[in-house]
Amino acid sequence: MSLDELIAQADARGLAASGLACSDRCVSLLVEDDELLRPLWAHLVDGSDWSESLEKVRAALDAVEPGAGSGSGADEAAGVARGMLLSAPAERDGEALREWAQACSAASLRVHRLLDPAHGSAEEALPLVEAELGRQAVVLQLLAEHGPQGLRRALDVSGEGRRVLRAVVSRRARAQA
């Protein structure tokens, strides 16, 4: 099943988890705090309102200075990552949530494309992008198959992707130094 089909069939919790997981994987471009989005994940687990926690995340992002000119797509990628979280809907239902999940999917793929070491080569399949596509599908499948019980594994998948992206950014910085 394609990623678009998985998003189309996802319920509200799956859509929220999909958008949040994409954001979670990319937020390390902005902050080093791996716990920044934990409260939002907790709201998905217990089904409670996440609007107050979302505002705290936005305030934390507003306090972060924009990129310092690291170039090679990193600044653009950080801006895309910021946009994912700033555009999250306060209400976790309705069409706005589906649109956010779709936008986060596309934005996360764009971030991975910008940072992929093979970016700009003649290769059509970029390894970092392909891995991100796989992670997005796994998150949606976990929620579709296991409901709220799939959230823990979705969080693990997201953490793995965050570590991979952080390693790519670190390697790029060392190569540019």
Image: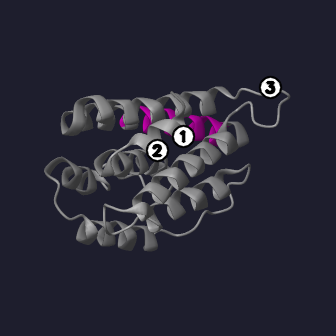
First in sequence, mark 3 or 1: give its number: 1
Crowding around mark 2 (Cα neighbors within 10 Å: few <14, some 14 to 19, many 20+) is few
Q: Which mark is residue 4?
A: 1
Image depth: mark 2 or mark 3 in front? 2
Q: Secondary structure at mark 1?
A: helix
The reply to whether dot 3 and dot 1 touch (C-beta < 8 Å) is no
Is label 2 in a helix, a strand or a loop?
Answer: helix
Any magenta on residue 60? no
Report the span colored magenta.
159-174
Compared across the picture, whether 8 is left or right of 175 comes to left
Q: Is residue 87 above or below residue 111?
A: below
x, y percent for residue 84: 50, 59
- The amino acid type, in three-letter code, at marker 3 is Glu
Looking at the image, do the residues carrying marks 2 and 1 touch, with CB atoms under 8 Å apart? yes
For residue 38, above or below residue 170: below
Residue 18 in percent (x, y) is at 40, 45
N-terminal label among 2 and 3: 2
Q: Name the residue located 59 percent from the left edge and 62 percent from the top edge.
A: 79
The answer to the question of whether label 2 and label 3 lie on touching residues, with beta carbons closer than 8 A, is no
Q: CA distance from mark 2 to mark 3?
A: 30 Å
Mark number, residue 70: none
Where does label 3 land, which residue?
123
Give the Cα separation between the discs numbered 3 and 1.
24 Å
Above or below: residue 128 compared with residue 51: above
Count every numbered label the image shows and give the total. 3
The local secondary structure at tag 3 comes to loop
Q: In 3D space, how far apart are the residues under numbered discs 2 and 1 (Cα atoms)?
A: 6 Å
Disc 1 residue crowd, few under 14, some 14–19, many 20+, Cα 10 Å: few
User: Viewer-proximal residue, 45 or 143?
Assistant: 143
Read off the residue under disc 2: 8
Instruction: Identify which amino acid the numbered label 1 is placed on.
Output: Asp
